[in-house]
Amino acid sequence: MITVEEALALVLENSFPLEESEILPINQCLNRNLAKAVKAPIDLPSFRLSSMDGYALCLHQSNIYSIVDEIKAGDATNPSLKIGECVRIFTGAVVPDNADAVIMQEKTIRKQDTLTIETPVNKGQNIRLVGSQVKKEDFPLEKGQLLQASGLAFLKSLGIDEVEVVRLPKVTIIITGNELIPSSEKLTRGKIYESNSILLQSALIHQGIETQLISFTEDSLKATTTNLKKAFFNTDVVLVSGGISVGDYDFVKQALKELEVKEIFYKVRQRPGKPLFFGKKERVFVFALPGNPASTLSCFYVYVLPLLNRLKGGKSDGLIRLSIPIEHDFKSVEPRALFLKATVQNKTVRILDRQHSSMLVSFAMANALVYIPEQDILLKKGSMVETLLLPNSILN
Ligand code: AMP
Ligand code: MG
């Protein structure tokens, strides 16, 4: 059995950005990664502009200026100033070509058309120069850059309407288990409500990825093999839920073998999620995730997410990891590495109750996972623990 670190290294080693890309309008590019560096078609700003409400001055020795005009944001005028003259100007307006500086209005006294300035003014003050953010023909955003609201807005500010992004990975989900029924049915003896499909689907949507197919499979070798075989058609990643452990009715491992999926690893020294399988058949990746819902999601965040991120063109190694002081003592009775549902608040982290891999309730409240390496059994309040921020952590 391999360690968490070895397993993650194998995932990253095997990951690559998908080669295909598509050109999309900016408003469809949220959460997508650039397939190419973007070249700036213009200087930004494209004209010298005022960063203050105040007066644009043609400097001289005296602190008295005569006001000869007014320029507001959007105006195209370019009044010619003589030495000792100024114009009233507002934030975002074009600074006249022969003005040297802008003084903020709070530092001036105006009487009709005469302005007295109360502080010394340096040349260039409060003027944003052409290209001071980005120069024309430069490449401000690199290949692989994830586009968030800010990135999309930045591209718009350059007048760019469409960009080339890496195509999204196609993901197929297979849910195994005879005991699973949909919530629309009445619960009967031995059955449970199926929850891993919405779990995985939602976690994928959070990454901007729509699931292209979900299929449900009974616990038999034939059904599992048939469904898995179909799942390999036109996909990049197959996620299998359940049936990967060592029970007599766990058929996923055998089905993967029959379909000649190459095993990259099986079983990781961790809790939850020990019987995790990662493999590949030609260009299609397979994760078989242990079916206990908290194991499924923990494995998704720790191992599947980095793969998806790389496939869609990103560079990240997965969830952000921070060292954060723990709010309480902690004692583990488990030699395996642990991923524990936790909440980060007020710069400390608290491990939640009800950690069992069958329990989703703590996960539903968590915004982080605390990672306790193997054999790290006793932790004192205030000691630093490695904490993986979940994608919802900014809102929770
Ligand atoms: P397995 O990995 O198939 O051995 O399943 C482990 C445990 O997780 C069992 O108690 C299953 O009933 C439960 N489980 C498996 N798949 C799901 C699912 N899709 N939704 C909810 N619980 C599940
Ligand atoms: Mg099962």
Image (tube, rainbow, N blue to C red):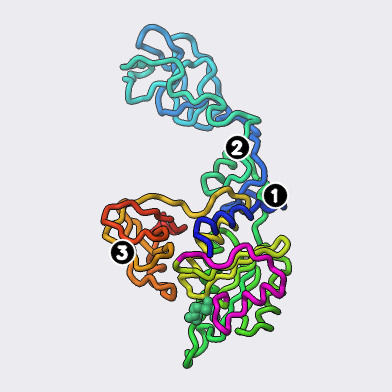
| Residue for badge 3 | 331
Q: Secondary structure at mark 1?
A: strand
Towards the viewer: 370 or 256: 256
| Residue for badge 2 | 158
Q: Residue at x 48, y 70 (%)?
A: 295
Q: Secondary structure at mark 3?
A: strand
In terms of sequence position, does the residue under pointer 3 or pointer 2 come before the other? Answer: 2
Position in image of residue 129 (x %, y %): 52, 24
> Would residue 368 be visible to someone looking at this image?
no
| Residue for badge 1 | 23
In terms of sequence position, does the residue under pointer 2 or pointer 1 come before the other? Answer: 1
Asked if residue 249 is positioned above or below residue 128 in the image, the reply reads: below
Position in image of residue 281 (x %, y %): 71, 65
Q: Is mark 3 within 8 Å of ligand 1?
A: no
Magenta segment includes 248: yes
Towards the viewer: 141 or 227: 227
Q: Residues within 10 Å of mark 1 (few under 14, many from 20)?
A: some
Q: CA distance from mark 2 to mark 1?
A: 17 Å
Image mark for residue 387: none
Position in image of residue 132 (x %, y %): 53, 27
Position in image of residue 117 (x %, y %): 34, 16
Q: Is mark 1 within 8 Å of ligand 1?
A: no
Three-letter residue code for mark 2:
Leu
